[in-house]
Amino acid sequence: DSGVTQTPKHLITATGQRVTLRCSPRSGDLSVYWYQQSLDQGLQFLIQYYNGEERAKGNILERFSAQQFPDLHSELNLSSLELGDSALYFCASSTQTGRETQYFGPGTRLLVL
Amino acid sequence: QKEVEQDPGPLSVPEGAIVSLNCTYSNSAFQYFMWYRQYSRKGPELLMYTYSSGNKEDGRFTAQVDKSSKYISLFIRDSQPSDSATYLCAMSASRDDKIIFGKGTRLHILP
């Protein structure tokens, strides 16, 4: 168990809908990262927050947004969902910005029908 | 050319064999190299982390980086069925730079 929690574990929704994925980092970790994992693209970095502030952006679509709250938990919002958004979404956390020491959560499996 | 290339496998080897997993990359700026292990329906977990070239050993695992060839390897000695998982290589140019992952190699250790 990495200490990173993610809810929900599974999510089934329809195209055009909006969903929110939630992540609680390990105790003491200030950085939260979001990743998308699909069979064809592999693990893709989406966005990083550090102590409430956006720190880095990766391949995140404009339909997606995230935020980190004062208690350091983070939410990833996915809107106008398309079939191609079906994937595993992982949250990871690290103590500072040392990205090489990230601890991953169990993921949220999103299926868009 | 993709930044990080990794053979997806699957790679099947008998229990007790030495396993060699590899990645090649194109960006010469990469300095930090990692190997993650991902079990089915779980998140990746960091196995090995190396900086720049050279070898690093941790128990049955050895990570090797050859920056001149842009090639990294992970060796698993005395492989066990519990080593069956997908292994992802990952790298970045600096501690603050985004990490680029390979697509992973599926490994099966046959009892």
Image (tube, rainbow, N blue to C red):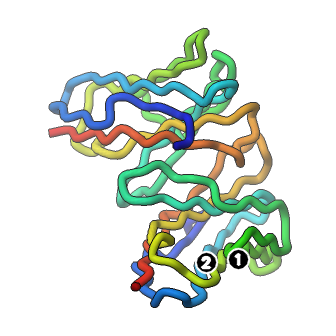
- Left or right of residue A111: residue B83: right
Of all residues shown, which one is farthest toward the top? A70
Counting labels gives 2
Q: CA distance from mark 2 to mark 1?
A: 7 Å
Q: Amino acid at mark 1?
A: Tyr
Tell me the tag on residue A111.
none
Q: Position of residue B68 (x, y in %)?
A: 82, 78
Residue A63 in view: no
The residue labelled by disc 1 is B71
Q: Amino acid at mark 2?
A: Asn
- Left or right of residue B99: residue A24: left
- Left or right of residue B17: residue B70: right
Q: Determine crowd level at label 2: few under 14, some 14-19, many 20+ residues with C-alpha closer than 10 A.
A: many
- SS category of the residue bearing label 1: strand
Q: Position of residue B12 (x, y in %)?
A: 42, 85
Quarter assignment of residue B72? bottom right
Identity of the residue drawn at 79% across and 48% down = B94
Identity of the residue drawn at 27% across and 37% down = A10
Q: Nearer the viewer, residue A47 or B42?
A: B42
Q: Chain of mark 1?
A: B
Q: Determine crowd level at label 1: few under 14, some 14-19, many 20+ residues with C-alpha closer than 10 A.
A: some
Q: Position of residue A28 (x, y in %)?
A: 69, 25
Tell me the tag on residue B22.
2
Tell me if residue B26 comes above or below residue A63 in the rendering: below
